[in-house]
Amino acid sequence: MFDDYISLDNTPLYQSASGNAEVCQLLWGDGVRFDGAAGRGIRRPVIARGGRRGFVAKEALGGASLLEFYFIDVGQGDGILIKTPGFRHLMIDGGYPRAMQETGKNAADFVDWKFCKDYGMATIELDAMLASHCDADHFGGLDDLLDLARQAEFDASAVTVEALYHPGLSWWKEASGKTLGTSTSVGAAGFWTQLLGGRAHAKRATTGGDGEQLHGWWHDFIERALDTRTRAGTPTPIQRLSHINQYLPGFGPNSAGEPSIRVLGPLEFDVGGKPGVRRFPGDAGQNSNGAGLLLRVDYGRTRVMLTGDLDRVSQQVLLDDYTGQRAEFLCDVAKTCYHGSEDVSYRFLQAMQPAATVIFSGDNEGHDHPRPSIVAASAITGHLELDTENDDLLTPLVYTTALARGIELGFPKRLETLDAAGAVADTMSGQSLYRTALHLTKTKRTQVKLGAAMVVGGLVYGLVNVRTDGDKILCATMNEHDGSWRIKTFRSRF
């Protein structure tokens, strides 16, 4: 895939073999392809991130492929791409469907860029795709990836998926709308027993027959997964996960040079000879969240917890279920539960004690995430490490995808009106723009001269990078003003 890797926390990609003009800044673990002979100078010509050509200092090379987590800004939702040292790729959630996004983008756009622009591939090849649970703000972007034909602006020509995983609890069709299916009680405990299973069950549940049928967008996503193929051209396997699996298939312990991925939830129970997951007090939404996947990625001494949308009740139950084994939740990095909502167990945060927390938070005013109390709780329950010599705080660190986001602002230069055929019929520029009044809604200022109005030209998606060699952990966000990186590093404590 690459000829060499960056060994420093960050280093410039220079425009030429001498001089200080930069193309961009490269991060620890970024791969480069050699672009000609090394020569005798102190810089080597390379092709780096996104296909950019330039020169990198030879002393900055000699690194290795790392375990990389890309926490992708998808607004209100989750989207995570994992790249292993052996270049296996896992996609966990993807945000709402692109058609529902105010920006028209979600995690699928970043994945398309990563494979096509960064790797120079024509096909997106995923070794695993996981939907943490059956809510559209998590699986919607996965659905977009599986249907590239709908997305005309994507560069990839196809996508392959070696296996698709889900937690089982699903939205089922009923006469009045949707339901989470059949449940039963055993003593004081309730359990959901109508769980989506493997590929054969998924096919029966999407064919429109007389039997049980999946509902709505979840139905459409699973139906599209049935049409997906592996690299070899065979149908993509579909599998339900629970703690019974212990590990994600293919990512078990002692994988040579690769991470292992523990499946800590949902917990599965035998309910009258059938598999069941806990039914929690509360509404259907709280149950779909609470029965989602809980994963821990282990690599060397590093632990990263991925928690989906677990809420307070489900977290409290997990603490009880893991009594005597709560060290399973300790981690270096945690993807926080439920977008920074206050519906989170403080004791569960204490059990994780992450050195770095990543919060997926959108700008939706109806949610107002992340809540101040959860940002504070993430800090005070995080692992404290100080640099006493320099009077500096090393950890805990708290990141939010919304804060990593930026917007591009500009002034109108020219206004064109088009005819029915799309040709320019009239043009307005210069002083004409300043003599034109633009009337606004939802703002305190209701009128502005068009020529003086700043316009949002685009959204720069936030992205939180987490990289590790199994010992050192690097967290980075980009400063969109100049392309530099804000970097923090610390060591794993496991």
Image (cartoon, grey):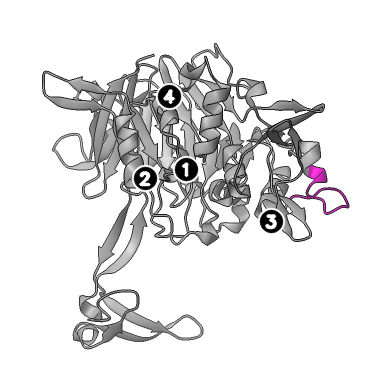
Q: Residue at x 69, y 32 (%)?
A: 188
Q: Which residue is mark 2?
A: 401
What label does residue 351 carry, if any? Answer: 4
The range drawn in magenta is 203-214
Mark toward the viewer: 2 or 1: 1
Rounded to the nearest angstrom, the CA distance separating label 3 from label 4 is 36 Å
What label does residue 315 carry, if any? Answer: none
Near mark 3 (Cα within 10 A), the count class, few <14, some 14-19 or many ≥20, is some
**Which of disc 1 and disc 2 is earlier in sequence?**
1
Q: Residue at x 79, y 46 (%)?
A: 205
**Residue 61 visible within the image:** no
Q: What kind of element bears circle 1?
A: helix
**Which of disc 4 and disc 3 is earlier in sequence?**
3
The reply to whether dot 2 and dot 1 touch (C-beta < 8 Å) is no
Residue 235 image point, x, y percent: 74, 37
Rounded to the nearest angstrom, the CA distance separating label 2 from label 1 is 13 Å
**Which of disc 2 and disc 3 is earlier in sequence?**
3
**Which of disc 3 and disc 1 is earlier in sequence?**
3
The reply to whether dot 4 and dot 1 touch (C-beta < 8 Å) is no
**Relative to residue 306, is residue 175 depicted above or below?**
below
Q: Quadrant of residue 226?
A: top right
**Relative to residue 255, is residue 486 depicted above or below?**
below
* Amino acid bearing label 1: Tyr
* Amino acid bearing label 3: Gly
